[in-house]
Image: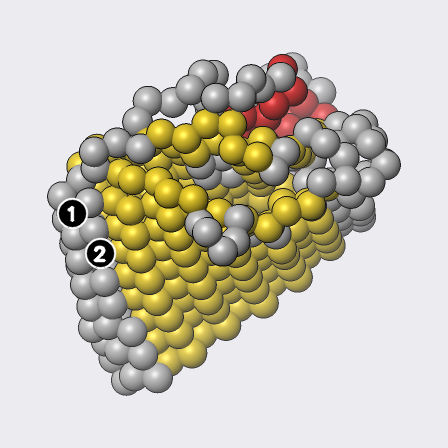
Amino acid sequence: MLKMDDIQKRLLEEVADLHDVPVGAYNLRANGKSVGRNSTDEIVITPKEDVSGIDIRIKDGTKNQSVHIPVVLSESGLRETVYNDFYIGEDCDVLIVAGCGIDNCGVQDSEHDGVHRFFVGKNSRMKYVEKHYGSGDGRGKRILNPVTEVYMEEGSSVEMEMVQIKGVDSTKRTTKAVLGENAHMAVRERLMTHGEQTAGSVYEVVLDGDGSSADVVSRGVARERSYQKLDLKIVGNAACSGHTECDSIIMDEGRILAVPSLEANNVEAALIHEAAIGKIAGDQLIKLMTLGLTEAEAEEQIINGFLK
């Protein structure tokens, strides 16, 4: 394993909660290079031969196992696209932790684009955690454009936690999922922008199988002059149920555009969307300020609770 410097270690902790090399299967990447990889008897990681990226194959029946695949960038001007494919067997229960942290102290833009495809086997359960984080005092931007595709077989279950709360100048998050019979997906997105940052989240969930269901909830905070666009779409092609929710706080000169979309192609498809955009309520601020907090401290407490 290559040695990681203090900045890279800090980024790794921010995006993957790792203080050291994780136990089990992992692939650690820093500044465009592999800095460590480990497979287990149940989870095998191999590099791709045609493009930059890896294949992760999880054997049938694998339970209570995890895979960590974080990426960190600490060089200004570095741009990369990585393709990772996950093949999850039947009757599995696994945790996959991804994410990317960029520290840019230079004048050139740094960008990481990760394309992740998940093929989830029959009756398997997967939890996927993806965190994005940016830091650095340079004029170069920190850019992240993740693409996530999920293909779910009968009876499978996927839980996704998508988090970006600091330091990313520009991002477009694109997620597509196709669910088979009795498959279920739950997505929880948390997003905060500030300064001149822009963020776009695009979700398209296709419910193809009878008994399939999806619950997609996005919570966002747009501060200062930042801009967010939330584009959530559910397509019901069977006897299914789907729910999306956009819940956003707008502050200062921020802007938010929510674009809900429901498409029912079966008389038994039950689809619901909820959306709300508003400022922090004055009575909430007053209540916390009576407890001794300043207005700024009260705002932070409300935002932290909202994005928790």
Asked which secondary structure carries label 1, the reply is: loop
Q: Nearer the viewer, residue 264 or 27?
A: 27
Residue 213 picture location, percent across and down: 28, 63
Distance in Å between CA atoms under marks 2 and 1 = 8 Å
**Relative to 160, residue 241 above or below:** below
> Mark 2 near mark 1, Cβ–Cβ under 8 Å?
yes
Of 284 and 236, which appears nearest the observer? Answer: 236
Q: Position of residue 112 (x, y in %)?
A: 63, 45
133 lies above or below 183 = above
Q: Point out the residue furthest to the front here.
A: 49
Q: Going 71% across and 40% down the picture, which residue do you hit?
A: 78
Q: Relative to residue 287, is residue 108 depicted above or below?
A: below
What residue sits right under mark 2 in the picture? 121
Residue 205 is situated, as x and y percent measured from the top left of the image, at 40, 66
Q: Kindly identify the amino acid type of the residue bearing the numbered disc 2.
A: Gly
- Given the image, on which type of amino acid does mark 1 rest? Asp
Residue 60: mark in rendering: 1
Left/right placement of residue 99 relative to residue 229 reads left
Classify 10 Å Cα crowding around label 2: few (below 14), some (14-19), many (20 and above).
Answer: many
Q: Tell me, for residue 282, which label it has, or none.
A: none
**Residue 75: in sight, yes or no?**
yes
The residue sitting at 33% across, 22% down in the picture is 23
Q: Is mark 2 on a helix, strand or loop?
A: loop
